[in-house]
Image (tube, rainbow, N blue to C red):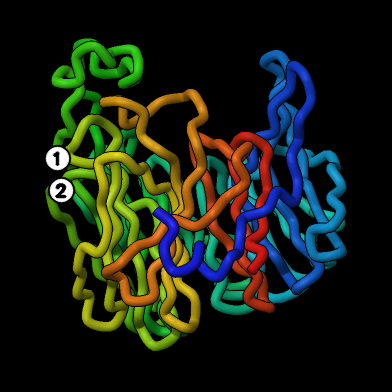
């Protein structure tokens, strides 16, 4: 599935691969602060012992250095080429030197998943147990977002997991409430692969908080839906992509929506029964990229790594698979673009790949 002269004869080349016996590198996030400096975060799993790490490059991905972290970084956010934050189970850490040193913000909340900053001071954080916060001093102190508590859901079963802003005024926080199903439903799907009907996707309550004034006020709304919104990304003119992932058996394991960040309109632009999409990227040109894995047989979700796939579309209608290093596999993959437009994919199997035209 590689028309258009194999997409101009380009290929996703392996730029880094942590390949050591009895150890696995799980990459949770990746950011490029410049064309040359990039930083990935996650942990080394060595015989069940998890060690927090960073993996960084200062030469555009030619060489990578692995270094220790104090906590396992869940996600990264940088507001410019030097100032950034990472979220960890015990709070938020800040860097002012592009990730070379980090300082724990002692008053930051715990159990968070993501932060988003509009500038050096004004930011937001979300996480498990219905947590949503705002800061006006770069993360030194945090205040709860009152609107996040308004939906009538139990905090133990409610998670805010995604923040995205279209511009300085229009933004959204996505979340969901998913009470336990009971019975054997807490067993992972791959243990019940012989009878997928036992784990059919159930609708749950999706929660969205919208702001049109840069986070001064938020308006909550809820809807019963299948799947969970796990990623949204926007261009400054309002064009965007949204990813919905289904946790159990559904018609397909994921679907991608074209979004209008100003009007809120949404249209499905991709779904497939044989591909599980785990991240989306929209370039300034409007070209869209999807990263995920092949589906093997009838099992949509598996802890066993599968072949990595990256798809591209210039019109959000025709999707073409891009050529990729045959060694690349993953359970989950993330897509990132550097400030110079170079494209990168990182996996939870310790791989970082670069698109080479």
Q: Is residue 26 left or right of residue 184?
A: right
Marks 2 and 1: in contact by CB < 8 Å? yes
Above/below status of 169 relative to 83:
below
Query: Picture coordinates of residue 342 (x, y %)?
Result: 65, 70
Query: Picture coordinates of residue 85 (x, y %)?
Result: 67, 59
Q: Is residue 107 visible?
A: no
* Sequence order check, earlier mark of 1 and 2: 1
Where does the C terminus fall, quadrant-wise? bottom right
Which of the 4 image quadrants contains residue 38?
bottom right
The residue located at (52%, 46%) in the rendering is: 333
- Badge 1 density bin: few <14, some 14–19, many ≥20, Cα 10 Å: some
Q: Which residue lies under the disc numbered 1? A: 203
Numbered badge on residue 100: none
Q: Secondary structure at mark 2?
A: strand
Which of the 4 image quadrants contains residue 219?
bottom left
The residue located at (50%, 37%) in the rendering is: 307
Q: Is residue 355 visible?
A: yes
The residue located at (21%, 62%) in the rendering is: 268
Query: Picture coordinates of residue 91 (x, y %)?
Result: 63, 46
Above/below status of 297 relative to 206:
above
Above/below status of 284 relative to 34:
below
Quick one: 332 or 212, which is closer to the camera?
332
Q: Which residue lies under the disc numbered 2? A: 225
Quick one: 153 or 274, which is closer to the camera?
274
- Badge 2 density bin: few <14, some 14–19, many ≥20, Cα 10 Å: few
């Amino acid at each position: 599935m590689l028309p258009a002269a194999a997409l101009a004869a380009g290929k996703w080349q392996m730029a880094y691969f942590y390949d050591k016996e009895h150890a696995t590198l799980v990459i949770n996030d990746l950011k490029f602060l410049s064309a040359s400096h990039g930083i990935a975060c996650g942990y080394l799993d060595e015989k069940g012992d998890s060690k927090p790490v960073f993996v960084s490059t200062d030469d555009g991905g030619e060489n990578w250095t692995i270094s220790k972290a104090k906590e396992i970084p869940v996600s990264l956010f940088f507001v410019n080429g030097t100032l950034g934050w990472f979220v960890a189970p015990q709070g938020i850490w800040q860097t002012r030197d592009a990730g070379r040193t980090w300082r724990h913000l002692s008053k930051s909340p715990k159990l968070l998943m993501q932060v988003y900053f509009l500038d050096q001071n004004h930011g937001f954080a979300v996480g498990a147990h219905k947590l949503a916060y705002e800061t006006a001093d770069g993360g030194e102190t945090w205040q709860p977002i009152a609107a996040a508590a308004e939906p009538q859901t139990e905090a133990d079963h409610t998670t805010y997991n995604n923040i995205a802003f279209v511009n300085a005024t229009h933004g959204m926080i996505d979340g969901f409430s998913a009470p336990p199903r009971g019975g054997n439903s807490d067993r992972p799907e791959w243990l019940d692969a012989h009878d997928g009907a036992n784990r059919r996707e159930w609708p749950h309550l999706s929660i969205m908080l919208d702001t049109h004034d840069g986070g001064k006020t938020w308006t909550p709304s809820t809807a019963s839906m299948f799947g969970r919104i796990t990623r949204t990304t926007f261009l400054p003119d309002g064009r965007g992509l949204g990813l919905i992932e289904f946790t159990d058996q559904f018609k397909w394991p994921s679907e991608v929506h074209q979004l209008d960040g100003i009007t809120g309109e949404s249209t499905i632009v991709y779904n497939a029964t044989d591909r599980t999409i785990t991240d989306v990227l929209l370039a300034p040109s409007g070209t869209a990229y999807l990263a995920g894995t092949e589906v093997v047989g009838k099992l949509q979700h598996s802890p066993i790594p599968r072949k990595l796939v990256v798809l591209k579309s210039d019109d959000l209608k025709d999707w073409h698979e891009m050529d990729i290093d045959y060694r690349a596999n993953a359970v989950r993959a993330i897509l990132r673009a550097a400030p110079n437009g170079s494209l990168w994919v990182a996996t939870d199997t310790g791989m970082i790949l670069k698109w080479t035209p």
